Amino acid sequence: MKTHLGLSGASAKKTAENLEVVLANTFILYTKTLNFHWHVVGSNFMELHGLFQGQYEALALSVDDIAERIRTLGFKAPGTLVEFLHLTTLHENKEDLKATEMLKHLLHDYETMIYHTRNTLTDIDEKDVGSRALLEGLLTHYEKTSWILGAYL
């Protein structure tokens, strides 16, 4: 069943395609942050372990919100690792990293998310208030998280 949102089919499709990349990036960042949560060591273990947990929990909620927005627009949301890896603009880490390197990688990824989200916002029909509001909320979260990560470095 398709919902009538008052948007053109082409506009909704373009937005859904942009949101697919946002979804993939968010899922990859969620996975990376969860991995860092599991493997961080060092004198600030407890602090970073907790920081990473808060971040991956927030990202998990965002994954659901983004996927549901794609569905609301009338499209199938990607939901497999293969799809996410094909769509993402982020890179996974395969090597063991020190805590400072983890922070640097996460900061870089959040900065990438900020850049992509801003560009996505410029592509979205002004009438698509729902998608714009979702992305503006995500952007605010990405900016604050970048500031927090940067404060550690």
Image (tube, grey):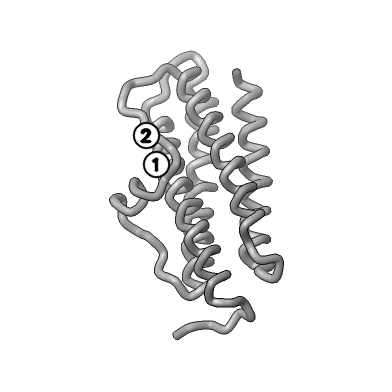
The residue where tag 2 is placed is: 92
Name the residue carrying label 1: 31
Residue 102 position in % (x across, y down): 46, 24
**Residue ID at (41%, 43%):** 28
Identity of the residue furthest to the top in this view? 43
What kind of element bears circle 1?
Answer: helix
Q: Is residue 107 above or below residue 73?
A: above
Quarter where residue 135 is shown: bottom right
Judging depth in this view, the residue of 100 and 115 nearest the camera is 115
Name the side, left or right, on which 84 lies relative to 19. Answer: left
Does residue 125 appear left or right of residue 81 in this picture? right
At horizontal 45% and vertical 15% (from top left) the residue drawn is 42
- Residue sitting at the far left: 82
Amino acid tagged 2 = Glu
Where is residue 45 shown, x and y percent of the image?
47, 22
Front: mark 2 or 1: 2
Nearest to N terminus: mark 2 or mark 1:
1
Q: CA distance from mark 2 to mark 1?
A: 9 Å
Q: Residue at x 44, y 71 (%)?
A: 75
Residue, x 61% and y 48% (percent of image)?
119
Residue 145 x/y as whole percent? 62, 36
